Amino acid sequence: MDLIEKTREFVASFLEGEPSSHDMSHINRVEALCLEIQKVEGGDPFVLQLSALLHDVGVIKEHEEGGDHAVYSAEIASEFLSKAGMGKELIEAVTGCIRAHRFSAGESPEALEARILQDADRLDALGAVGIFRAVLSMGALRMLKHATGIDKGSSKRTVYIEDPIEGFNEYMQYKPFTIPEKLNTDTAKKLAEERLKIMRLYLEALNFETGID
């Protein structure tokens, strides 16, 4: 089994039972988006695949302890790749991508591969799948706080609003609708505009049906 498939199995074992939107299906979509963007923009596909597969491997630890899953993921990735016999240069390239990917961190990475991973991860918050992930994640985080008391920090301004529809509206304004201006590559920007069309239509219909102006 090659390293990519070993990594896929490793990550799947970590994310088994992941209750929110950072599950293995998200990982696979981000990997596919990275490779789609790479075909146009360039970059090392091997670094991109490893970075995409490992970028959220620390999310369970974040659920349990709080903190930043990007930092946890980079640490786990470094240990995993070291044990797999990978060189320092490759490990630094992959962990650099992982540390910079998180939306709320506001990072502006220099490496092309890091810029592509960041774009791919943000694109998966858009479109029909973006709506599904947002609703799933909001519900999971609300239940997490109820069950454990863990508050997800910056997310609380939308996740923990008493009326979840109001919270969803605010979430759309501060995250999905601002993503295009924060993307790094032209390829990702084109994909984003197509995905945002369905989100705008959905939000318009939701607000019409619920009587929100």
Image (cartoon, rainbow, N blue to C red):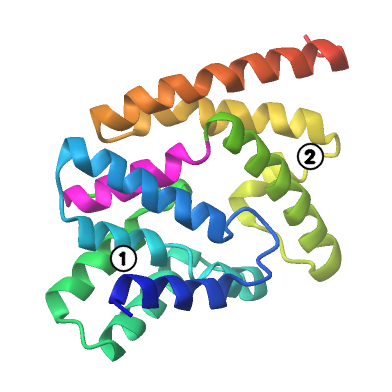
Residue kind at label 1, given as amino acid type = Leu
- Provide the secondary structure element on which disc 1 rests: helix
Q: Are marks 2 and 1 in contact (CB under 8 Å)?
A: no
- Provide the secondary structure element on which disc 2 rests: loop
Q: Quadrant of the N terminus?
A: bottom left
Magenta segment, prevailing SS (helix, strand or loop): helix
* Residue displayed at 55% across by 67% down: 59
| Highlighted magenta segment, given as a residue range | 110-125
Q: Quadrant of the C terminus?
A: top right
* Residue displayed at 48% across by 63% down: 56
The quadrant holding residue 122 is top left
* Residue displayed at 46% across by 78% down: 10
**Above or below — where is 45 with respect to 122?**
below
**Above or below — where is 81 with respect to 210?**
below
* Residue displayed at 38% across by 78% down: 6
Magenta-colored stretch includes residue 207: no
**Above or below — where is 136 with respect to 202?**
below
Q: Position of residue 95 (x, y in %)?
A: 29, 68
Q: CA distance from mark 2 to mark 1?
A: 36 Å
Q: Which residue is mark 1?
A: 50
Magenta-colored stretch includes residue 120: yes
| Viewer-side residue, 171 vs 22 | 22
Q: Which residue is mark 2?
A: 161
| Viewer-side residue, 132 vs 140 | 132
Is residue 108 something one can see in this rendering?
A: no
| Viewer-side residue, 14 vs 35 | 35
Along the polypeptide, which appears first: circle 2 or circle 1?
1
Mark 1 Cα shell of 10 Å, populated few (<14), some (14-19), many (≥20): many
Q: Position of residue 177 (x, y in %)?
A: 51, 25
- In the rendered structure, the answer to whether residue 80 lies left or right of residue 20 reads left
Is residue 200 something one can see in this rendering?
A: yes
- In the rendered structure, the answer to whether residue 172 lies left or right of residue 119 reads right
